[in-house]
Image (spheres, rainbow, N blue to C red):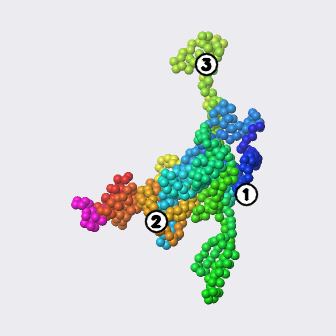
Amino acid sequence: MIINPDKVPFSAIKMQREEAELLQRRVDELTFEGKTEEQSDNMRILEECRMWWDSLYDFRRRRRRNRAYHRGDQWSDRIEDPKNPGTWISEDQYIRDQGKVPLKQNIIRQMMKNLVGQYRASSNKSIVLSRTKGGQEGARMLSNAMMHVQDLNYLQELDARALEEFALSGGIVQKELYKYFKIRGEEDVKIKMPNMNRVFFNTDIEDVRGEDFRIVGEIVDAPLDDIIATFAKTPQEEERIKKLYSMTDKQQFLDYTGLESSRLDSLNFYMPEDPSKARLIEVWRLESRWRTRVHDYADGSLEVTNLSMEEIQVINDQRVAFGEANGVPPENIPLVDGESFKEQYWKAKFLTPHGHTLWEGESPFDHGEHPFTFVVHPLIDGEVWGFVEDIIDQQRYINRMIILLDFIMSSAAKGVLMVPEDAIPDHLTPEDFAEEWRSFDGVITYKPSRMHQKVPEQISSNSTAVGLTDMLKYQMQFINDISGIHGAIQGKEAKSGTPSSLYAQEAEHSSTNTKDFFMSFNFFRQKRDEKILKLILQYYTEERYFAIDSDSEDTAQLFDPKKLEGHLYDLKVVQGNDTPVFRELLNQSLMKLVEMQMIDAETYLEHSPIPYSKAILETLKERKAEMQQGQVPNGQAPMPGENPESQQMIQQAVAGTR
């Protein structure tokens, strides 16, 4: 009997997988004699990680189904075969068994394009704000540094794919690191987006802000040379890593499935699908330890140390003894006040599947956390699902209506020729008669029978859809209403006579239905960018220039870390105003101020969104300086803004950019 994997309880699938992996681990253990205590502890950690990864099986299964519908594979759900009860076949195969083609109309893909298009048109950006007086200059430097990191990692493109992932699964994950960029020859902030099939975390989370994560990690498959380059610092360490991965096949593995997802759909926790790759498991765990909060009254310092209370008492006894020896009264001797507390901290381990440690240590980041940024949505009672999952039923109903219409049209009479047998001439066969009938200049002669005077007749009938077209129309409307993507937000042409203001208002109201989706995505971006900001504050310790695009305030912004000392900063993701409509409105407002002579040419160009406004401003400043020094060439016009013709010159410059 063939078992439908989508219908089998998760517990049964998990049990089968656990049995297979337990057998594999027993075989592995036999090949490693003398397992150390550290390996045993690491194997227990890996087992915990595997259980959390297994608990995400239903999440990955639903994500895989949503991905199939998004791609257009919308008849792959399995059903029980009516002809062979107890066996399961795909809906695609069932329809083909009826002699029909499984047609589909992929509405989901078009809606996903609309969501990504809305994101690309929104121009959101991250702005750094200072929490202390006098830190505005540092905030501007950090905002430029954020733009530099975004450009360096092509975050606009990366976030577009993250938005698709968010719509498919309801979850997003990215990693914020400080790594070496080979193409640039320097270290900088690096952003990665792991595949959701490879990540794991404790699935008993309930906080939508992600503050109850205790364990996070990633399954990594990489060439052995990459792992050696990352973890080996000496030739001896290189040999050790090669020995740990001695089973790795040196030959390149050829997979003729190409860019298909089968290798990720069948991912195993311990063994890589590609034998030429080495499996590495990155684990970050929230651990705890006893620490001491120390307040030294000698200098007023307050710090957290590893000193025990007994050691602090020894320090105080030494101070008292030293003070008494020098005639200082005991009440005037500054002592150290300590308090023990349990501190939580994140610890990382990079492990082989057999429990060997390649690297371990506390979080190297000043923020003290793991490098992952997770957001899962909506996390109601611990459940997570994506945007696509809400509209799959409507997509299926639309496909079903199309198939039914195709069945009806294919079964209707389409010009069937009814010919009495005695009306076919003796010198023609029925096939010859039909061929002559179809010819545009064909002629058929025959002698009608005295008994039967009926002539050949061609019959056609209209297919009766019995309301199917209306149902199809309703379902198309339902899928738009449920998704919240309809009307003006789709860019549909407005009715004749519709005012532009009303159309803009309709588009704004239509976007309200997807506002929660985008706000949750912006929440992810803010959490991600907050970690980027902390990495910038930690690792940008020297002066550097940032090459920023021409629309920013400076084309090359100097970053001076000394100007950040003594200030605190926050980060906020705000709605950008870099759309063509906004630029036109801003330019019109500035032009009105120029016409009213409330601003001069320099002020206009400083805030103008027109291209090359900053370059023109620098040229005007140079000319103004030359005028003040009496160096203006003969016959050259004076500085705009210094005479009545400046307004006309500005208008001509603006007109030239349209």
What amino acid is at disc 3? Pro
Question: Residue 543: x, y in percent?
Answer: 46, 63
Q: Nearer the viewer, mark 2 or mark 3?
A: 2
Question: In the rendered picture of this protein, how many numbered marks are placed on residues?
Answer: 3
The local secondary structure at tag 1 comes to helix
The local secondary structure at tag 3 comes to loop
Please tell me the numbered disc located at residue 456. Answer: 3
Depth check: give the residue in front, 515 or 363.
Answer: 363
Quadrant containing the N terminus is: top right
What amino acid is at disc 1? Glu
Residue 234 lies in what quarter of the image? bottom right
What segment is highlighted magenta in the picture? 625-640
Q: Nearer the viewer, mark 1 or mark 2?
A: 1
Question: Residue 321: x, y in percent?
Answer: 65, 84
Q: Is residue 474 left or right of residue 18?
A: left
Secondary structure character of the magenta stretch overall: loop
Please tell me the numbered disc located at residue 60. Answer: none
- Compute the Cα span from label 1 to label 2: 49 Å
For image coordinates 58% across by 79% down, the residue present is 299
Question: Residue 556: x, y in percent?
Answer: 42, 59
Q: Nearer the viewer, mark 3 or mark 1?
A: 1
Of pointers 2 and 3, the one earlier in the residue sequence = 3
Query: Would you say residue 536 is visible in this rendering?
Result: yes
- Compute the Cα span from label 3 to label 1: 94 Å
Question: Residue 609: x, y in percent?
Answer: 41, 58
Depth check: give the residue in front, 478 or 271.
Answer: 271
The local secondary structure at tag 2 comes to loop
Q: Is residue 655 left or right of residue 303?
A: left
